Amino acid sequence: MQAILQTGFAEQTINKSRFIAMAVQCSTEREVGAALRAFATQHQSAHHLAYAFRIKAERGVIQRFSDAGEPSGTAGMPVLKLIEGRDLINACVAVIRYYGGINLGTGGLARAYGGTAKMALDAAKIGDFVEMQTIAISIHYNQMDAVTKVLSKCNGTILNKAFNERVDLELCLPKDEVVGFLNRFK
């Protein structure tokens, strides 16, 4: 599986309609909603916001799309097919359309939405998907530097920290690193 490591954008004009696409990493449906709202806010006068996403959840892979009022299967479905074809996970691709007054037909719409989405994915940085896990751990103060160094090496992050009698941490790190990390800092 692949993941979007850096957001990609693209824009093209087809028969006076302007299409703008964004390919972004989202790991929850809430993040998808936030990304779509932010994109829509930037383009408030746009006529359509079609999108598709595919995310890994506890209950399996969730994928959805929206044609945003365009004829069924002409906007969101071509975008979803691109996401599936590239084996992307935790990915959302959205395409804004400013209608230019010329009807493109169902084939033209599918090519326009799919083509603009492809351009955004081509502009994005794509890499291997690494499943992350959140853990809680309590450590001694003198272990903090070692924890920070190990997290840095495995691309983990500190989400929360509380300084009490011990340091209570909420961490996010690659799932494959969790057992070794916990064994090291018990």
Image (cartoon, grey):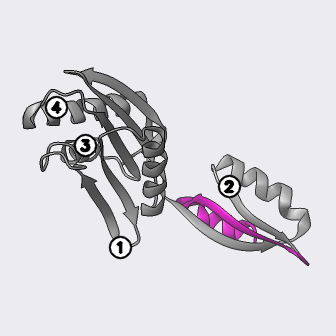
The residue pinned by badge 4 equals 111
**Dot 3 or dot 1, earlier in sequence:** 1
Q: Is residue 124 visible?
A: no
Q: Quadrant of residue 148?
A: bottom right
- CA gap, disc 3 to disc 1? 23 Å
Residue 6 to residue 90: above or below = above
Q: Which residue bears the numbered disc 1?
A: 59
Please, is residue 50 above or below residue 123 in the view? below
Q: Earlier in the sequence, mark 3 or mark 2?
A: 3
Residue beneath the point at 62% across and 61% down = 172
Q: Which is more foreground, mark 1 or mark 4?
A: 4
Instruction: Name the residue type under label 3.
Output: Val
Q: Residues within 10 Å of mark 1 (few under 14, many from 20)?
A: few
SS label for mark 3: helix
Indicate yes or no whether the magenta region holds residue 138. Answer: no
Quadrant of the image for the C terminus? bottom right
Circle 3/circle 2 CB separation < 8 Å? no
First-in-chain label (3 vs 4): 3
Q: Earlier in the sequence, mark 1 or mark 4?
A: 1
- Rendering coords of residue 146 (x, y %): 81, 56
User: Left or right: where does residue 103 sit relative to residue 172?
Assistant: left
Amino acid identity at mark 4: Arg
Residue tagged by mark 2? 157
Q: How many marks?
A: 4
Residue 107 falls in image quadrant: top left
Alpha carbon of mark 2 to alpha carbon of mark 1: how far? Answer: 25 Å
Residue at 25% of width from left, 43% of height from top?
79
Q: In this figure, which residue is indicated by the disc labeled 3? A: 79
What residue span does the magenta drawing correspond to?
A: 164-186
Q: Mark 3 or mark 2, which is nearer to you? A: 3
